[in-house]
Amino acid sequence: MTTDTVHINQPTQQELDQAYEDYVDRGISEGMEDLKAGRVDSYENVKKRIFAKCLNR
């Protein structure tokens, strides 16, 4: 395999940036849907579950 082959098959920085933007946009929209539907938990409850999970290791 030559270096030309490696570079040709790699996504461009612009493609990577667009994929990241799409990922973030999708996460934000899913989060907003969860907020509207009431499928969220309080910070305190999440913190308790994380600490409990870490302590049970």
Image (tube, rainbow, N blue to C red):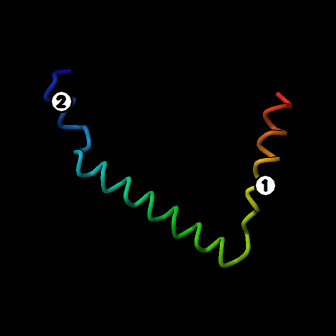
Q: Which percent across, then down, holds residue 28? A: 51, 65
Q: Earlier in the sequence, mark 2 or mark 1?
A: 2
In the current view of this chain or complex, which residue is farthest to the left? 4
Q: How many callouts does the rendering have?
A: 2
- Which is more toward the observer, 11 or 17? 17
- Of 35 and 43, nearer the camera is 43
The secondary element bearing badge 2 is classed as helix
Mark number, residue 31 = none
Q: Is residue 21 above or below residue 10?
A: below
Asked which secondary structure carries label 1, the reply is: helix
Residue found at the far bottom of this picture: 36
Above or below — where is 22 with respect to 34?
Answer: above
Front-lying residue, 35 or 14: 35
Which of the image's four quarters has the N terminus?
top left
As drawn, is 34 to the left or to the right of 28? right
Quadrant containing the C terminus is: top right
Separation of marks 2 and 1 at Cα, in angstroms: 51 Å
| Few, some or many residues within 10 Å of mark 2 (<14, 14–19, 20+) | few
**Residue at the spot 76% in from the left edge and 48% down from the top edge:** 47
- Three-letter code, disc 1: Glu
Amino acid under label 2? Thr
Identify which residue is drawn at 27% across, 51% down: 15
Tag of residue 5: 2
Question: Which residue has dot 1 on it?
Answer: 44
Give coordinates of residue 19: x percent, y percent.
36, 54
Residue 44 x/y as whole percent: 78, 55
